[in-house]
Amino acid sequence: MIAAIDNPTNPADATTPVAPDAASTIAVAMSGGVDSSAVAALLQMQGHTLVGLTLQLWDQRRLAGKDGIPEQVTGRCCSLDDVYDARRVAEQLGIPYYVVNQQRRFEQDVVQPFVSEYLAGRTPIPCTLCNNHLKFDELLKTARGIGAERVATGHYARVQYDEVRGRWLLLRPADRSKDQTYFLFGLTQEQLSRTLFPLGEMVKPAVRAMAEEHNLRVAHKPDSQEICFIPGGDYKAFLSAYLHEQGRTMPETKGEMVTATGEVVGAHEGIHSFTVGQHKGVQHQLHKHHAEPFYVLGIEPATNRVVVGQEPELHTRHGVADRVNWISIDALRGPMRVQAKIRHRHQPAEATIEPLDGGRVAILFDEPQRAITPGQAAMFFEGDVVVGGGWLV
C-alpha cells in the first residue's frame, strides 16, 4: 500500500492504518538513498513487519531561480526525487509506505533558527537541528500512530542498553569514515530505546553490495552532499532569497575588521559572510597588503566587528558548550576526562570537561584545537561511547 501524494511539491499527510502487531512492526525512515533502502531490505530479510515513512521537509522549488539560487541542483538530501526513489523501493519490497508533511515545522524548527544564527554571526548545523528537534521526534510519533513501536534509520551509529548504568547508549559505528553520531547527540533516552541503527556494524561498501544483491534501484545512487534547503551550498544567496520572500531585508551588519589587539586593518560588508577559521574573502578586504594570510578568529555581533589574525591564533584549548544533552550519564557533577569533537570532520581530542553555572560545560583540551566555532556542536566521547553533546558558544 502506497500513500498518495496529491501535490508532489507539497505532499499531504497520509491517512495512517494501524499495524497488526506494534511490538514486531518497525517503521523504516526512508530517505530515498541507498542506506535507508538497504535497512528496509535487511530488516525484511530478517523477517520483520515493516512500514516505510518519509518526512517531506522542504519544497525544493520554493526559492529556485531567486537571488542567485540555481534552478536545479543535484546531490541534496530530502529532495522530491528522493521521495520518489523511496516510494519505488517500498513498492519493490512490497511494504506500506507513507509520506508525512512536516514542512511547516521544519521551517519553524530548522530554517528560521538557521537564519537567525547566521545573521547573529554564528555557524549553525541544520542537519543536527533537524535530527534533534524534528526528525526523530516526528518519526517516533508517526510510527506509534500507525502501530509501530520502533523506528529504524540508515544512520551509521550504534545503540545498546547498558544494564550497569541503566541507560541506553549511543556509540560510534564500525565504519568510522561514515560516523554520524555528531548529528545524533540530542537523542533522548526514550528515543534511543525505540531506535534501531542496523548499519552500525557494517561498512559502506558492504551496504552497497547488499543493495545490489536485492536489486534495489538506488544501489548506485551517490550520497547526498548538499543541505536540503541550501542548493549549491551558497548560504549568502539563500539568506538573501529567504529574507526577500519573507518581506525582510538583509540587516545592516557591515563594520570593521580588527586584530586581536583591536587594531583596525580593514572593513567588511556584513558579519553573515564570515565564520571562524575562514580565509576566503578576508585578504581582499584588508586596508593594505599583508604577506601572511589572515583568517577569521571571531565575530562580535554587538559591534559588527570581525576579528582576524594569523593561522596560529586560531588554535586554542578553551571552549564552552551549553544546552548539553547527556546520554551515557544523567548529569555532569565534576571534572571528567573525555575525547571532545568540535565539528563533524574533527578527530576527537583528549580534553577535560567541567560543569559551569547555568548548565554550561567548560572544555579544556590537552592540546590547542583549530577554530572552535560558536554555533557548531561539541560532542564528548569515552572511547566509542557518546557521553553527550551541546552547542558551542
Image (cartoon, rainbow, N blue to C red):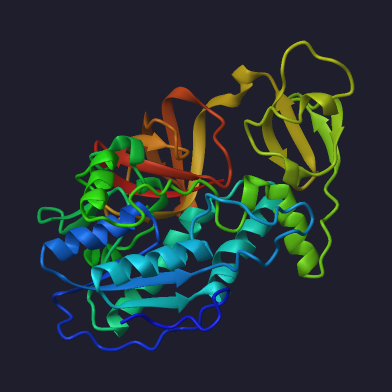
Horizontal relation, residue 153 to residue 316: left or right: left
Residue 148's spot in the image, x, y percent? 23, 78
Specify the quadrant of the image occupied by residue 88. bottom left
The mark tally for this picture is 0
When the figure is inspected, residue 129 is found, relative to residue 100, above or below; the finding is: above
Q: Nearer the viewer, residue 14 or 243?
A: 14
Q: Residue at x 36, y 47 (%)?
A: 220
Given residues 344 and 218, the one toward you in this image is 218
Q: Find residue 243 and report its horizontal and vertical position in percent.
A: 76, 63
Query: Splitting the image into 4 quarters, where does residue 97 fall?
Result: bottom left
User: Taking 338 as reference, is 344 left or right?
Assistant: right
Of 334 and 167, the residue lying toward us: 167
Would you identify the image quadrant in which residue 44 lies? bottom left
Task: Give the vertical position of 289 relative to 306 (above or below).
Answer: above
Above or below 150: residue 122: above
Coordinates of residue 132 in the picture (x, y in percent): 43, 61
Residue 29: in sight, yes or no?
no
From what the image shows, is residue 337 above or below residue 16? above
Residue farthest top in this picture: 291
**Quarter of the image with the N terminus in it:** bottom left
Decide if residue 238 is on the left or right side of residue 173.
Answer: right
Instruction: Report if residue 55 is visible in the image.
Output: yes
